[in-house]
Amino acid sequence: MPAKYHVRVALVAKADLKEILNYIAFDRPTAADRLERRFAERLKSLRRYPERFPKIREKFHTKFIYRHILINSYRIVFRIFGNEVLVVRIIHQARRFRRDMFFGLD
């Protein structure tokens, strides 16, 4: 049986998700509900084989390897260490990575 990882979501990632869902819910509440369920499913999927998701290729000068999951126009950005997965940000795919987006997470 594959190893099970413990998934934690950083406070800033929780705030990212809340902002995204509130923005969408303003005009399309049912779409926001669907998207929230998709995020929950994908976060749950990180418990098994989080390595299957691709590494982020952008260079933003950090000492960690980050991976991401794509959902619609958004990225769930996370890193793996030991048997833990830490979701650090949930951002729109159009946003470019900057080191300060991960301040306090390195």
Image: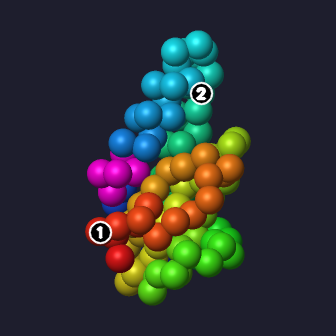
Question: Is residue 98 shown to the viewer in this render?
Answer: yes
Using residue 16 as the reference point, say whether residue 77 is left or right of it. Answer: right
**Mark 1 residue crowding within 10 angstroms, few (<14) / some (14–19) / many (20+):** few
Q: Nearer the viewer, residue 16 or 103?
A: 103
Q: Is residue 12 magenta?
A: yes
Residue at the spot x=49%, y=43% of the render?
Answer: 40
Q: Taken as a whole, is the magenta stretch helix, strand or loop?
A: helix
Q: CA distance from mark 1 to mark 2?
A: 31 Å
Question: Is residue 41 shown to the viewer in this render?
Answer: no
Residue named by callout 1: 104
User: Image height check: is 31 above or below 61?
Assistant: above
The image shows residue 71 at horizontal and vertical percentages of 66, 46
Using residue 80 as the reference point, say whether residue 97 is left or right of it. Answer: right
Amino acid identity at mark 2: Arg
Q: Quadrant of residue 17?
A: top left
Q: Which stretch is magenta?
A: 10-14
Residue named by callout 2: 34
Amino acid identity at mark 1: Gly
Residue at the spot x=46%, y=56% of the render?
Answer: 89
Q: Earlier in the sequence, mark 1 or mark 2?
A: 2
Q: Nearer the viewer, residue 72 or 92?
A: 92
